[in-house]
Image (cartoon, rainbow, N blue to C red):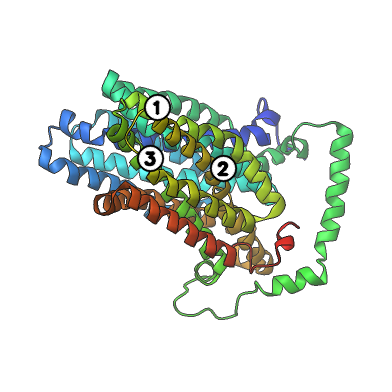
Amino acid sequence: MATSKPPIFLKFRSSTGFVLTTVALALFTDLWLYGIVVPILPFILSDRLNVPHDQIQSYTSILLGTYAGATVLLSPIAGVIADRLPARQIPFTGGLLALVASTTLLCFGQTIGVLILARILQGASAAVVWTVGMALVKDTVGGENLGTAIGSMFSVVSVGELLAPVLGGIVYGKAGNNAVFGMGFGLLGLDILMRFAMVEKKVAKRYGREYAEDSGTDEESASNDEQSDENTRLLAKPSDEEEENLRNYVLPPKLPRWAPNGFIYILLTSPRLLTAQLVSIAQATVIALFDATIPLLVQDLFNFTPLSAGLIFIPLVLPCLIFGPLAGKGVDRYGVKIFGTLGFLYLAIPIFLLRTVRAGGTPEVVKLAALLAVCAPGISSVSTPSIVEASEVFGKYHAANPELFGPEGPYAKMFAVNSMMFSAGLAIGPAMAGLLKERMGYGGLNAVVAGMCVAVAGVCFGYLGGRPRKLTGWWR
């Protein structure tokens, strides 16, 4: 029963499409503002703060590390808070305010201390946005359609991750500091409007059940209600097979001393969850490696301008917009094992072949563009399994131990851990690129990364989605 007069356009503002678009924009804005800052930090230090040249590298590393550290430390706190609050929108909006503050300080800050504070706030915002945003997606679409939703969103979000560093450098060189951050403030303005307009489905439901459902005829709604009631009766009494399966997820009555609570115990003892986090780290590492190496590679081999270096990412980004949703639907239908395993195996091939690109004219540029395009299906395939797998495993633990996590479940804390692992991968990628390229060259770097993908594929085959079954079993 409705509690009061519903807000204007409530049905649209609480619709699945609007909620997912709002979360996708929030993630895109976060990665965009992170990406545009990275390549111009040295110039901000030298041009605005007059930092001596021999200190720029150390201060740049401090600022990059401050962001990663804040994200890793604050993600668990964001997860705990989000699971305890009655609505996800409260911390979701708080993260936005932190991002606005950080962008303002980065744009106008005149001291190292102010820039460090700005990066801490930016890391805090990332911790909240990725943790609460993913929990909102889970709340909105449920577990069965999570892969499709994540795949579609990540195909768009990855555009910001890949293009922002290059565009940040181009705009800074052409128009200066204010133009770079002007792009960010424009995105933030749209982000503010959408986050404040969005209404969670569980909040909309307080005004009447029809407001928590997407558009459809009354007959369809009635049919859905009837089907939902029938499903509820069926789910109330699980089958013998389901009961046997859930028994495997019942926690022991007394946890070991090293596990302060059930969440930590599950996280550290489930091979499937550990593999899911490995996939998240590996995925972010590969993306960060592209950001760190491709612009320098094309400058060294082809004397590309910043504009040309930005355009070379198009063959990598555009196919992701197509393959991302397809891979997400595939994960929902066929499971995480096949996409995680084959995705990393496939990705190893074009990454290894990137070492064959040499200095030269148009043929070598075409070869590089083609190899980047071939990477796109692999990146899309490995972007979804981690979140879907973690959601499924924690869902089973929640069903088997309903008193452990409360009615909302452990999902915000789960996404907090995923955010930590992804942030770790974003930090590992550039560090790995710098270390290996200096010691082994670009070809050696690509060989190592390709080997890493093969190794991760092996772990995915062994543990992702449970123990390996016959190939035909994957397609059930």
Q: Which residue is mark 1?
A: 362
- Amino acid beneath label 3: Val
Compared to residue 256, the image places residue 1 above or below, namely: above
User: What residue type is disc 1 on?
Assistant: Thr
Q: Of the two numbered discs 3 and 2 on the same chain, state the one appearing first in sequence.
A: 3
Q: Can you give x and y, in whole percent of width and height, for residue 129 in the image? A: 48, 43
- Whole-angstrom CA distance, mark 3 to mark 1, is 12 Å
Image point 59% across, 63% down: which residue? 461
Q: Earlier in the sequence, mark 1 or mark 2?
A: 1
The residue where tag 2 is placed is 377
Label 3 SS: loop
Q: Which residue is mark 3?
A: 357
> First in sequence: mark 3 or mark 1?
3
298 relative to 233, above or below: above
Residue at image location 60% in from the left, 39% down from the top: 323
- Would you say the residues marked 3 and 2 are in contact, meaning their CB atoms lie under 8 Å apart? no
- Of residue 205 and residue 373, the one placed in the foreground of this image is 373
